[in-house]
């Protein structure tokens, strides 16, 4: 876990409607701006929940590090770990915007997060666009003909796909995944 540690200087933390119970599930997302980075966490107690138990954001008031081609996870990981550190304990399931496994079984963002957490949380990747030969299953939701791509570490990918299928909302992207995306952009 230490290889992903990074100090987020002058961070601003915002929490909304804290529930004292440990969340079973969280969805995470990160948004990069020219001069800062925002990591968002939306917690919920059931895959089909329509509303979050609570939301947290972590804003770094320093510019993001440069993107390294082929090493996206290095840029994203400190912010994901930072917002997870705001929780009392690790959730059972973490949903990330991206892939767990890339082509030829190479670890993606989700696999690196699963490893950084020593396997204490299941990590499910939900990507909106395909990535070469990534090890992910396509999932059609709503009336969309464009699939989401689901992958997982710590559970069978088919089980993860069915869990994402059950998530609340009539659209391609489930309600709470839309929410965490919007929250990271605030």
Image (tube, helix red, strand yellow):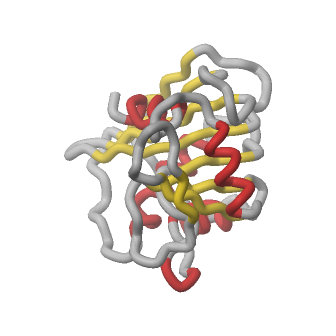
On screen, residue 168 above or below 35 = above
Give the x, y percent position of residue 145: 40, 49
Query: Would you say 26 lies left or right of 170 here?
Result: right
**Residue 63 in view (yes/no):** yes
Which image quarter holds the C terminus?
top left
Q: Nearer the viewer, residue 143 or 71?
A: 143
The total of numbered circles placed on residues is: 0
On screen, residue 7 above or below 105 = above
User: Which residue is the extreme one toward the left?
Assistant: 34
Give the x, y percent position of residue 149: 51, 58
Which residue: 42% across, 37% down? 181
User: Which residue is the extreme one toward the bottom?
Assistant: 104
Q: Which image quadrant for residue 160?
A: bottom right
Which residue: 71% across, 18% down? 19
Which residue: 27% across, 63% down? 66
Query: Would you say 38 lies left or right of 118 here?
Result: left
Q: Which image quadrant for residue 62?
A: top left
Q: Nearer the viewer, residue 143 or 54?
A: 143
Give the x, y percent position of residue 177: 50, 37
Q: Which image quadrant for residue 42?
A: top right
Q: Nearer the viewer, residue 42 or 163?
A: 163
Query: Would you say 3 lies left or right of 18 here?
Result: left
Give the x, y percent position of residue 157: 68, 62
Which image quarter holds the N terminus?
bottom right
Which residue: 76% across, 20% down? 20
**Residue 10 in view (yes/no):** no
């Amino acid at each position: 876990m230490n290889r992903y540690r990074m100090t987020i200087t002058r961070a601003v933390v915002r929490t909304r409607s804290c529930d004292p119970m440990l969340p079973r599930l969280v969805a995470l997302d990160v948004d990069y701006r020219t001069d800062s980075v925002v990591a968002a966490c939306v917690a919920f107690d059931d895959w089909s929940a329509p509303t979050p138990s609570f939301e947290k954001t972590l804003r770094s008031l320093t510019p993001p590090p440069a993107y390294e081609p082929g090493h996206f996870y290095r840029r994203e990981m400190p912010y994901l770990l930072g917002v997870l550190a705001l929780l009392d304990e690790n959730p059972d399931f973490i949903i990330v915007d991206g892939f767990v496994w890339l082509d030829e079984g190479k670890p993606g963002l989700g696999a690196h997060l699963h490893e950084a957490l020593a396997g204490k949380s299941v990590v499910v990747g939900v990507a909106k666009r395909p990535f070469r030969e990534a090890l992910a299953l396509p999932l059609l939701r709503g009336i969309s003909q464009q699939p989401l791509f689901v992958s997982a570490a710590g559970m069978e990918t088919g089980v993860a796909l069915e869990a994402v299928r059950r998530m609340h909302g009539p659209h391609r992207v489930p309600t709470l995944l839309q929410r965490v995306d919007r929250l990271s952009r605030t």
